[in-house]
Image (tube, rainbow, N blue to C red):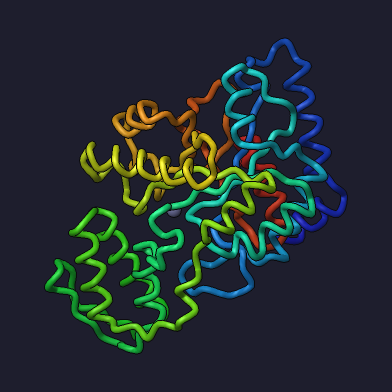
Amino acid sequence: MLRSMAKIAVRLDVDNAANRIVEGFYCNSRHVASRLARRFQVLAYHKVSPDPHPFFEPDHPTAFEQHMRFLSRCYRVMPLMELVERNRRGDIPHRAVAITFDDGYRDNYEYAFPILKKYGIPATIFVATGSIDTGEPLWHDRIFDSFRYTRREHVSLRHIGLRDFSLETDQLRRHSLALVLTRAKELYGHSRCKFVEEVEKALKPNLPASLKHRMLTWQQIREMHQNGIVFGSHTVTHPVLSRIPRDEVVKELSESKRQLSEHLNTTVCAFAYPNGHSADYNDEVKTVLKETGYLCAVNCESGFNHVFSDPFEIRRGKPWHKEIELFRMAFFLQRHGLN
Ligand SMILES: [Zn+2]
């Protein structure tokens, strides 16, 4: 029902026309408060790839291209940093949108970058620098891999504070994975490394060699940077910042900034919070961000941004649907706070 309605609406371009009318009304009406008059959305992508993943599904390049074609035709896709600056001045233009990616997967270079170039779309990629050119996977990928490539059907993790798990069905596997991820997010540094190693030891995954090359290289990052893609920090090791001591926060924020600045020979001032929900950062983290020289930070709380939003709490929405019709409807509803 919803799908059929969305298909008809998109065929008639209803979402686009309605948005133009509503945004025009906001901007022309003297009765609408200025905070409502200018709004912007930031989209958060991770992987763009035709290769399926059972626990961390990428956006298919075909769907990604449909999103980009639609946004470049109907909205004004702008660099995130320009939006941040205009947000500060209260000068957000009509139909403003920014595109971002988190983590730094190599498929951003292989599949997303050619599409962004084709449509002339600016984007910001937030990378966890500890996984660039080191062959070191992000800790959550090591846990995903353990559950994805294990042949075991029963596993005991009692010795690391969890319990015995059955992995006989997809549903049980997902449930066990969620519990392990939740526990891992509470840890940092050596304790988290040890925990992940114990998970790997217990599950004994049979890992394909291709996994070594899943993250971007500095060479690819430099090439994209030379072609207008902006890079921001997503820490060094992707910890949940509200769970770690202040000196570790300082290290994660300053070291990732230093590495990016040196490799790109530019100032790095955008940041994306790992995990990104409001419980995953706090005022102290925001203070360290400012002290370290960042100018903005994006989270993963869905919704649109009002003009004059706190630049260290910029909301981002996911690309919610594979089908362009449902994506467009979700995008429109979120833009106007109707979801
Ligand atoms: Zn991330």
146 shown above or below 112? below
Q: Quadrant of the N terminus?
A: bottom right
Q: Residue 183 at what x, y percent from top left?
A: 25, 60
In the image: residue 66, left or right of residue 222: right
Locate residue 147: give its quadrant.
Answer: bottom left
Lateral position of residue 262 relative to residue 156, left or right:
right
Q: Name the residue located 64 percent from the left edge and 15 percent from the top edge.
A: 34
Can the viewer see residue 299?
no
Q: Quadrant of residue 170?
A: bottom left
In x, y percent, where is residue 243?
25, 45
Name which residue lies at 41% across and 41% down: 258
Instruction: Give the quarter of the figure containing the C terminus.
Output: top right
> Residue lying furthest top in this view?
30
Residue appearing at x 69%, y 48% in the figure = 227
Is 265 placed above or below 151 here? above
Image height of 198 relative to 183, above or below: below
